[in-house]
Image: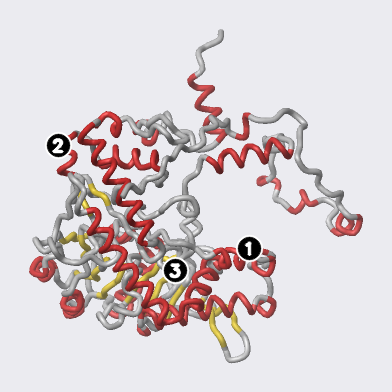
Amino acid sequence: MKKERNFHQARWDEPIIMELGSESERGVLLPEVEDSVRAAAPDPQALIPAALRRKKAPKLPELSQPQLLRHYLRLSQETIGADLDIDIGLGTCTMKYSPKIHEAFARSTKMQDLHPCQPVETVQGILEILYQTGEYLKEISGMDAFCLFPGGGSQAIFSNVQVLRAYHAKYHPDEQRNEIITTILSHPGNPGAAATAGYKVITLMPGPDGYPDLAALKEALSPRTAGLMITNPEDTGLYNPHIQEIVDAVHQAGGLCIYDQANQNGLFGIARAREAGFDMCHYNLHKSFSAPHGSQGPACGAQGVTAVLEPFLPNPAIRYDGTQYYFDYDRPESIGKIRKFYGNPQVALKAYAYIRTLGGAGLKQVAELSILNNNYLLHLLSQIRGLSLPLAEGVRRIDQSRLSWQQLTGDTGVTSDDIDRRVVDYGLQSYFSSHHPQLIPEPFTPEPCETYSKADIEEFADIFRRISEEAYAQPETVKTAPHRAALATQIQPEYLHSMELLATTWRAYQKHEANNRPNQG
């Protein structure tokens, strides 16, 4: 049965807002300053150090209210996202539905009107939520302490590396533990964080079964081993059944083990970091715990550790003394602040609501439904010409799968990137082929999680079946896509990588235009 829709996106050719309106046009009148406020602060400018004051007022858009409304409504019609399409395929990034009641909580004046520097006795509600969210995460993971301050998964990974460094500095001060082991299919943030912190990175490749080679791990271990950083399941969707043996081997060599649990969604209530022997882990609250990605943010990386590592967590810790919640800065072994001291409380609030709504049984059902959805989608995709599932043939996947369009590319010349653009013509968000390095050629990594219905999954699979048919019958249709999207021209790679061509702000664009304008003299 045909499932795909007859989709055509709005295309407005909308100018950027700085090119709209005219001088002195406005959409709002600011209220006059009250006399009492003026008397209390007669010269607000004087409060700003002279070196930080603007020499002239900033250039702002000047538009009437209907012009402004029309501009942003048009842009909204040119957007594809979780509320508009079946958002399954954003390669290794869990995209699940965020209940609107959670958004209402985060937008409540009780949340928005808080100031981070209020006295703690006036913010007991949000401190309690942050504290209790950490308590729930302790139960979910088996860890003994959590910090919710990291600004995302990668910063939580880096913060865990800093905790690892502090641990070895205290307990192994005379040892040269300067190597960290990871795997090629773990998230790139793991080797990236280790290298940024100054460690030598040793990368394990997968064996024929898709798992990191245990013999290679044991060969890599030495007195220089500081620790292991591993994602499980990796982005192949394969859960490593040898994980405890791997952890034990690293511990025997004196290293610590850091569990990247960004791929947590299929493990709720089924497997915990503690039972596998890990010393640290992290969750992405903006993924598995339903808070939206928000286009690279806002995000929250929840960092968990065992009791021996708790003193090293970032400052401050949120404590409860039986009567009041408060910030504890008296932690001399802490790695210090990693960002603003209150983290991203709106995201933590949504995660708190998600956990409280589902409870333990509900979270386990999330995992079970995610695994069911993933394997049903795999069943449908396995019938599509030109698409294959490399590594560990016949083994069930957890919450995502790393497929390959290599056969279709060899047969038709159509690549994964071509398909990535073509799906937009069917109303799907670009599925972001995969992380680098592309160990699996022409990759495709869908993750249906628990959000999507049977009908959603069938519609999603049918779109890729249709694109496969197009690739074999009319490959140029796919290669020249998109055709029915808001942006009907392909973005040329040089515009994304050349600093001479890239303009990320209005000021940069103006400077670029001035530098490239023909000489009028």
Q: Residues within 10 Å of mark 2 (few under 14, many from 20)?
A: few
Q: Please identify the quarter of the rendering in which residue 476 is found.
A: top left
- What's the CA distance linking mark 2 and mark 3? 41 Å
**Residue 413 can be seen, yes or no:** yes
Q: Do the residues labelled 2 and 3 touch (CB within 8 Å)?
A: no
- Which type of secondary structure does the marked residue at label 1 adopt? helix
- Which type of secondary structure does the marked residue at label 2 adopt? helix
Please indicate whether residue 384 sits to the left or right of residue 351 in the image: left
Quickly name the residue at label 3. Answer: 289
User: Of the residues under marks 1 and 3, which one precedes in the sequence?
Assistant: 1
Q: Can you say whether 54 is above or below 36 in the image?
A: above
- What's the CA distance linking mark 1 and mark 2? 51 Å
Quickly name the residue at label 2. Answer: 411
Residue that lies at the very extreme toward the right in this rendered image: 35
* Mark drawn on residue 107: 1
User: Mark 1 or mark 2, which is nearer to you?
Assistant: 2
User: Mark 2 or mark 3, which is nearer to you?
Assistant: 2
Q: Please identify the quarter of the rendering in which residue 362 is found.
A: bottom left
Disc 2 marks which amino acid? Asp
Q: Residues within 10 Å of mark 3 (few under 14, many from 20)?
A: many
- What's the CA distance linking mark 1 and mark 3? 18 Å
Residue 163 in the image: state x and y as whole percent. 36, 72
